[in-house]
Amino acid sequence: MDNDTIDLLAIGEVMAELRREKSTGFSVGFAGDTFNTAIYCKRSLGENGRVGYFTRVGPDPLSIDLVAMAQKEGLDTSHIASDREKMIGIYAVSTDETGERSFSYWRDNSAARQLFSHDEAVHALPPARITYLSGITLAILGAPARRRLMDRLADLSQQGASLVAFDSNYRPRLWENVATARAVMGEMWDIADIALPSIDDEMALFDDPTEDAAIARFTKKNWFACAIKRGVKGPISPTLSREDMPVFPPAQTVIDTTAAGDSFNGGYLASLLRGEDDASRLLAGHELASHVVGFPGAITPVEI
């Protein structure tokens, strides 16, 4: 691949995160599942990898600050387009006395929902070794845009132009109905080369009666890479025997699990891009996620 090829291109939506702090009121940050993964992958790769983000933003101050933050993190932002009529979405998160989180969303006018709104848009995707997206990426798109993107990803994979990595990240409220979500995600698993599912999402979406049943579905395909996330129990890979599976120590401190799966994906994909073996990739993802859950918010401070 030539010098214009990005190592990882993540596609999706970034939102402004308003987090209510007990002593200081609301603080503002930025987050989004594929965006979080892009940042953690870039941090893991450092200067040895190029990570880009593909989305749309608006002309509003939050959009401007978002792009500046992405650039400060070292992401390639040259494929973030601006929509003069839209803005980025916003969500607020608060935590009660028991630690239970509640969320409020304002995303109907999100510029990212206009991604792939015409036929030429899918051909604006830059060359990448890995193209990464999630079920949330697909859920925010209208059916025609979703179809365009999935067809393009299938072409890229079949032509060997890019490996397609996918995390179903099932959020029921974003989908028209469960049948649509199941059909779209099922087709996306057929397209993907790299599978990064969470066991809870898969069981909820496909009505698997047990974890073993969900895992069995992923053993039926010969993946380029596959890591099934299982929270505190640690991930597993269908390509590794139980004897070869690493030991996954639990996180020492758990404050906020918001980006546990996203950070796992970032660490895992960075390890894959470095050419490390399956066990090393699982450990890299688990160790990063174990670190991230010890801090509030989706993105840990840069100096941490």
Image: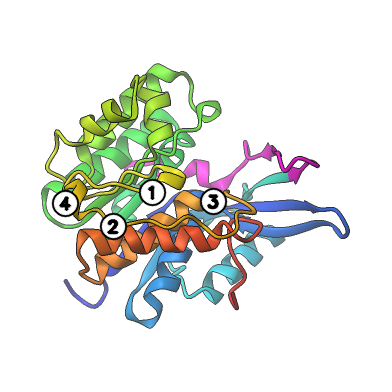
Whether residues under marks 4 and 3 lie with C-beta atoms below 8 angstroms apart, the answer is no
Q: Nearer the viewer, residue 263 or 18?
A: 263
Give the amino acid type for the residue marked by disc 2 in the picture: Pro
Of labels 1 and 3, earlier in sequence is 3
Q: What crowding class fits label 4: few (fewer than 14 Cα within 10 Å), some (14-19), or many (20 or more)?
A: few
Of labels 2 and 4, earlier in sequence is 4
Of labels 4 and 3, earlier in sequence is 3
Q: Quadrant of residue 255?
A: bottom right
Residue that numbered label 1 is attached to? 234
Give the amino acid type for the residue marked by disc 1 in the picture: Gly
Residue that numbered label 4 is attached to? 224
Residue that numbered label 3 is attached to? 32
Picture coordinates of residue 293 (x, y %)? 56, 56
3D distance between C-alphas at marks 2 and 4: 20 Å
Report the mark closest to the observer, 1 or 3.
1
Whether residues under marks 1 and 2 lie with C-beta atoms below 8 angstroms apart, the answer is yes
Residue in the image at 30% along x and 55% along y? 131
3D distance between C-alphas at marks 1 and 2: 9 Å
Q: Looking at the figure, which quarter contains the N terminus?
A: bottom left
Element class at badge 4: loop
The numbered mark at residue 246 is 2
